[in-house]
Amino acid sequence: MFRSLRARLVLLILMLVIVMMAVVGAFLINRTARFQLEDYSSKMAEAFRSEDFVLDLQRAADDKNAPQAMKSVLRAYSGLLGIDTVQRNFYILDADTGESLAGSDDRTSADLPLTSTILAALNGRVESSTRIDDDYMDTAVPISGKQGQYVVYIKDTKDNLQQLIAQIFSLILQALLIGVVLSVLLSLLVSKAITTPLERLTQSTKQMAAGQFVAELEVTGDDEISILTRTFNTMAMKLQQSLEEIGAERDKLGTLFLHMTDGVASFSRDGVPIQANPAAERLLGISFAQMHSYGEVFGALAPLFEVLSVKEPRYIQRELDLLGRTLLIYLAPFGKVATEGVMAVIHDVTEQKRLDDLRREFVSNVSHELRTPLTNIRSYAETLHDTADLPPETARTFSQVILNEAERMNRIVRDLLTLSRFDYGKMDWHVMPFQLDTMLQNIYAAMHLEAKKMSHTLTLTFDHTPIAISGDRERLEQVVANILSNAIKYTPQGGCIDMHVKTDADRVLIVVTDNGIGIPAEDIPRLFERFYRVDKARARHLGGTGLGLAIAKEIVETHGGSIEIESTFGKGTTMTVALPLECLL
């Protein structure tokens, strides 16, 4: 019933009013009673300190009918004593027996009890009793006369005081009733003024807890609740901004998690899968929706307890060959005791490993290609140096070998430098429009003599002339010359080599066909790799570096074209260079 702040505030204010009225009433009643008692005591003391009054009483006590005489005196001084014969009366008592001899109220004088005040007066002492818990006030004064010893006894029944207290109590009750009604009304207004902003704050807090951010609460003052409301608005605004930033970061991380190329999978400490991205499923070839446990996926690489025992930031690294890929697996624990588990990061290093193998092979090939001519140069140079009587003809032969090997090394270095420029994008291109048919005719004329030496039949045909394209003429001429030179070299004596030029939509096709030794099918995909040769011994004997086709491929693709090879081992080869009519450089 009193759980709400408003009800408790009303109850508190009501209790404060009741307590305050009770304290004020008790204090007022007590002070009123004290005032009456003090007034009675002061009147009695004033009266009996009066010399005239006491002398008159003593003279009356000397009279033969002393009680009546003393009664007359007391009646004469009734105003001083406050005698009203209703609530306050006087009595003349016999000092020896305590018997009432006369009084202002003869009807009750015979029933007077012997109070402590009377007993004290019978013993010769003046005594007055004004205790607040007694239902009367009395004063007893001993009077001596010639006729005997008497006691003048004044008794007040406190009826006036009790009536006054009853009236005060009634007024207090009425005031309390009015105060309760007013305090309830005022407390309702005050509690509403206090609790309404708090209720709005509570409602807004509940909505915030449910993830709903309401409009900014109105602030109408500078009191503590207004300061609290203003602080709440600031907190809500900053919290909303923080949640939006966290949401944005979560979305970014979620997008990154879904689309990253590396696989990520997490498992609980019991080995149950928690989450995995598509890359992990693709690399591992499984679906985590089928609840593959840690033991099924990575148990053979590292047991779960072993990974959980690894201290951060350390991790376990394993390599796995799976589905034709080389995967590098990083396993590490995460979280605290209650939420710990294992995180697996899967990195596909297949291409990296392939490139490493290619790099090692490239270095090996370069070393081998350079070592052979260097060895020959050194051998022949040492022979020339150490043999003084070497015949001139032999010396000239040795010198020619040295020059040939040096030129071979120069071609290798030049080709390597060209490929390096391609790799780093530093190749200088001289692009301009030119007549392709004129360039091919020049190449045909230059290669015709070489073909004739091997008794080859070399032909050049065009579907359409003239043909104009844009590009780096010198580089494209290098490509065609290299292809034509390979056709001449790898075609046995008396072969046929045809170079045919035609257009296809927005491309021009240069097709070189020979009936040479051909290329095995398994070697065709690797022909454009650097230093790759089908017949290494024969190619080296013919002076090739194994870089010509790799360079040709880079040049053609940079121009936006392509090179295709079709070959049948032992029957011949067809190479097609496709170039766009509009250069893409």
Image (cartoon, rainbow, N blue to C red):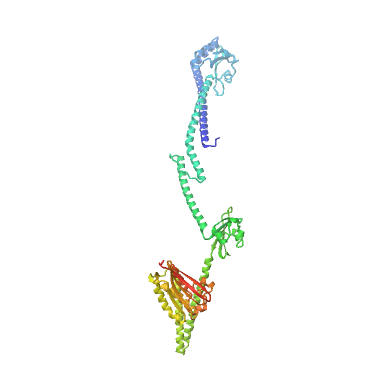
Residue at point 51%, 18% (across, down): 48
| Residue 524 x %, y % | 52, 72
* Figure quadrant of the N terminus: top right
Question: In screen coordinates, is 110 left or right of 229?
Answer: right
Camera-side residue of 204 and 235? 204
115 above or below 397?
Answer: above
Residue lying at 52% horizontally and 32% vertically, measured from the top left: 15
Up-down: is 412 above or below 40?
below
Where residue 343 sits, quadrant-wise, is bottom right
Hey, which residue is sitting farthest front in the picture? 463
Which residue is nearer to you in this view: 76 or 104?
Answer: 104
- Can residue 461 be seen at all in this image of the molecule? yes
155 and 2: which one is in front? 2
Residue 118 x/y as whole percent: 57, 18
Q: Is residue 268 visible?
A: no
Question: Residue 272, located in which quarter of the rendered image?
Answer: bottom right
Q: How many marks?
A: 0
Percent coordinates x, y for residue 156 in the rendering? 54, 18
**Res. 265 image quadrant:** bottom right
